[in-house]
Image (cartoon, rainbow, N blue to C red):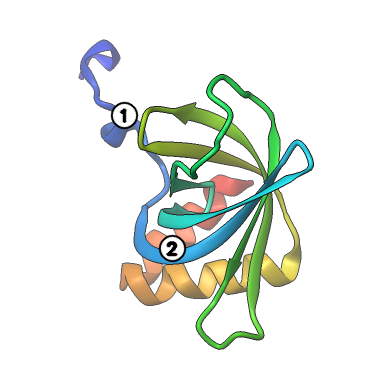
Amino acid sequence: MNSACTTPEERRQFQRILFEQPLTVLLNGRYHDTLLIDISLRGALVKRPLGWPTHDEGKAILEIALSDADSIIRMEAEIAHQDRDKVGFHTRFIDMESMTHLRRLVELNVGDPQLLERELAALG
């Protein structure tokens, strides 16, 4: 297969989980409340918040409160891409507790333990 012809979805190593959930993004000292569209072990796609800086490329902190209200997935990320409606983030750091919650979320939604293990192995 010619790699020049592959789509981003074909190159993607990590399964995206559709998971609409409110979240908060901290970017440049400002909090932005928005909606998570999907998440993976390596990043997240969010609805572009109102008042979001047009050309900002920076590090952010994403906080996703899970339905049990006591659990939060918190990750340090950087903007990977953005368009008029969405902002994609690439995870740079996630603490062990947040990774445990994220792994459980992926595990419940992927339904294939072998796929989950391959994704975890790809994280290194």
Q: Say left or right for 52 vs 77.
A: left
**Which quadrant holds residue 79?**
top right
Q: Residues within 10 Å of mark 2 (few under 14, many from 20)?
A: some
Which three-letter amino acid code belongs to the residue tagged 1? Pro
| Residue at 37% across, 29% down | 84
Which of the two discs, 2 and 1, labels the residue nearer the N terminus? 1
Q: Say left or right for 64 vs 10.
A: right
Tell me residue 44's x, y (percent).
Answer: 49, 48
Q: Please tell me whether mark 2 or mark 1 is closer to you in this view.
A: 1
Q: Secondary structure at mark 1?
A: helix
Which three-letter amino acid code belongs to the residue tagged 2? Leu
Q: Secondary structure at mark 2?
A: helix
Tell me whether circle 2 and circle 1 mark residues in contact (CB < 8 Å).
no
| Residue at 65% across, 72% down | 72
| Pointer 2 residue | 116
**Which quadrant holds residue 36?**
bottom left
